[in-house]
Image (cartoon, helix red, strand yellow):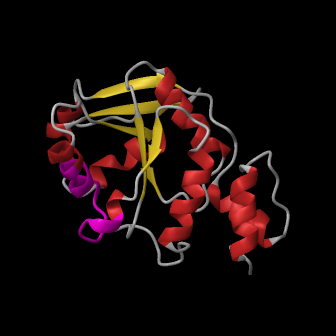
Amino acid sequence: MGGSFDPPHHGHISIAKSFLLSGLIDRLVVIPVFVPPHKSDDLSGYDIRLRMARVAFSGIGHTEVSDLESWLPVPSYSWNTLMHLKRSAAGSVIRVCMGGDSLAEFTGWYRYKDILDQVDLIVAERPGFSRPDLPAEFEGRVTYIKHEPLDISATEIRRMASDGVLSGEYIPEGVIKIISEEGLYRS
């Protein structure tokens, strides 16, 4: 499961738990993106995002936060990350875990057809979610799991932090501490 995790919040933790509870995976590797090919330059530093992710996911069994993308070529294409994982974990079944919003954008990913040739996708389906019309190459490669999302986003949390109003309701206390110590998201 990849993402910018800027910052990681209870929505990320909730979806991670849904993937693990699905019975489709034995272990979840959370991979903060190093240099995203599609995001702006206003991300917090990688080391801080990695540290926040490690704190946020530390209490979830069978979950590991990996710094893998920090030592792969940039930009951080999922294709490169997945091929490295397949080589280093030979014999393991690798699946990409994502939300429905990512699936809707998947055909825009670098080498998405090649990714589908190599791995299956597990997609967290929220209530009322409309499955996108997908090209034929997705046939048999996507498994949907039920997920009850939390109504929060990293963008909203950054705004709240800018206003000085962060709450453990949306974000783990350890992450709040890092945001405060590092002075993140201040206007």
Residue appearing at x 38%, y 26% in the figure: 25
Q: Does the magenta stretch include residue 78?
A: yes
Q: x%, y% of residue 131? A: 42, 31
* Point 28% across, 60% down: residue: 77
Q: Position of residue 60 (x, y in %)?
A: 57, 35
Q: Quadrant of residue 144?
A: top left
User: Residue 177, relative to residue 102: is it above or below?
Assistant: below
Q: Which residue is drawn at 32% across and 47% down?
A: 106
- Image location (x, y in percent) of residue 26: 39, 26
The extreme top residue here reads: 23
Above-or-below relation of 57 to 17: below
Asked whether the viewer can see residue 16, the reply is yes
- The boundaries of the magenta stretch are 70-84
The quadrant of the image that shows the C terminus is bottom right
Look at the image and tell me in which quarter the N terminus lies: top left
Is residue 184 shown above or below 60? below
Number of numbered discs overlaid on the protein picture: 0
Of residues 139 and 16, the one drawn nearer to the viewer in this rendering: 16
Residue at 26%, 65% in the rendered image? 72
Could you tell me if residue 131 is visible in this image? no
Furthest-bottom residue in this view: 187
Q: Nearer the viewer, residue 80 or 180?
A: 180
Q: Closer to the camera, 55 or 2? A: 55
**What x and y, as percent, mark residue 19?**
47, 29
Magenta-colored segment: predominant secondary structure: helix
Q: Is residue 152 left or right of residue 135?
A: right
Q: On the picture, is 39 further left or further right than 44?
A: left
Name the image quarter holding residue 15. top right
Q: Is residue 96 magenta?
A: no
